[in-house]
Image (cartoon, helix red, strand yellow):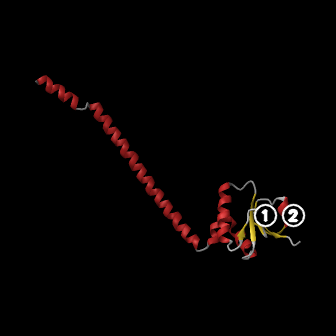
C-alpha cells in the first residue's frame, strides 16, 4: 500500500524542472501579451493623432492634396461644370499616388467630369513631363510643383 501511494504521488506531482519550465512559459506568454497591449495602446494614440489631423484637413480640403494643393486649386479655377479633365501620370508616379490623385480630383474638381483619355478632355493635369501628344493638343496654363496644367488649344 505504501508503494502504491509513493507511485501515485510520483506521477501526479511535477518535477522541479517541469515546474520551472511551466513558469518560464507562463512568464514568456505574459511578456508577449504585455508587449502586444503596449504596442496596441501606442498605435491607438498614433491613430488618434492622425484622426485629429485629418479632421483639421477637412476644413481645407485642398490641403489634403499635400504638395500638389496649389496645382489643384489653380486647375480648379480653370474648370466649370461642363469641363472634362484628364489626369496624366509620368512613370515616376507610383500606383498609390495615382489612385489618391484620381480619388481626390473626382471629389475636389466636381462638378467637372473626369475622363480617362486626354483626347476627350478639355483640360489636363500632368504629373511629370507631358507626353508629346499632350503638348500638341493642349496649351500650357501653368507649371506648379512639377505639375503641368493645360487647356485644349483653340483649333
Q: Locate the N terminus by quadrant.
A: top left
Q: Residue furthest left?
A: 1
User: In front here: 51 or 88?
Assistant: 88
Label 2 neighbour load within 10 Å: few <14, some 14-19, many 20+: few
Above or below for 39 versus 127:
above
Which residue sits at x=74%, y=71%? Answer: 75
Q: Is residue 38 left or right of residue 26?
A: right
Which residue sits at x=47%, y=61%? Answer: 45
Q: Position of residue 11 (x, y in %)?
A: 22, 28
The residue to which callout 1 is attached is: 118
Label 1 neighbour load within 10 Å: few <14, some 14-19, many 20+: many
Indicate which label's residue lies in the foreground, 2 or 1.
1
Which residue sits at x=87%, y=73%? Answer: 154
Q: Toward which corner of the image does residue 72 lie, by quadrant?
A: bottom right
Q: Are marks 2 and 1 in contact (CB under 8 Å)?
A: no
Q: Residue 31: which disc? A: none
Which residue sits at x=71%, y=56%? Answer: 93
The residue to which callout 2 is attached is: 136
Q: Locate the C terminus by quadrant.
A: bottom right
Q: Residue furthest top?
A: 3
Q: Is residue 123 left or right of residue 98?
A: right
Above or below for 134 versus 27:
below
For the residue labelled by badge 1, is the local secondary structure a helix, a strand or a loop?
helix
Q: Position of residue 138 (x, y in %)?
A: 83, 67
Q: Position of residue 116 (x, y in %)?
A: 74, 62
For the residue labelled by badge 2, is the local secondary structure a helix, a strand or a loop?
helix
Q: Give the Cα distance between marks 2 and 1.
A: 11 Å
Amino acid at each position: 500500500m505504501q508503494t502504491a501511494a509513493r507511485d501515485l504521488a510520483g506521477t501526479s506531482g511535477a518535477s522541479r524542472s517541469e515546474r520551472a519550465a511551466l513558469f518560464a512559459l507562463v512568464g514568456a506568454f505574459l511578456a508577449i501579451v504585455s508587449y502586444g497591449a503596449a504596442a496596441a495602446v501606442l498605435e491607438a494614440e498614433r491613430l488618434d493623432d492622425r484622426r485629429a489631423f485629418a479632421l483639421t484637413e477637412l476644413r481645407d480640403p485642398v490641403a489634403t492634396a499635400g504638395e500638389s494643393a496649389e496645382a489643384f486649386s489653380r486647375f480648379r479655377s480653370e474648370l466649370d461644370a461642363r469641363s472634362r479633365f484628364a489626369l496624366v501620370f509620368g512613370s515616376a508616379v507610383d500606383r498609390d499616388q495615382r489612385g489618391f490623385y484620381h480619388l481626390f480630383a473626382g471629389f475636389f474638381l466636381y462638378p467637372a467630369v473626369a475622363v480617362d483619355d486626354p483626347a476627350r478632355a478639355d483640360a489636363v493635369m500632368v504629373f511629370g513631363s507631358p507626353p508629346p501628344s499632350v503638348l500638341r493638343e493642349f496649351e500650357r496654363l501653368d507649371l506648379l510643383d512639377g505639375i503641368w496644367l493645360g487647356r485644349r488649344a483653340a483649333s
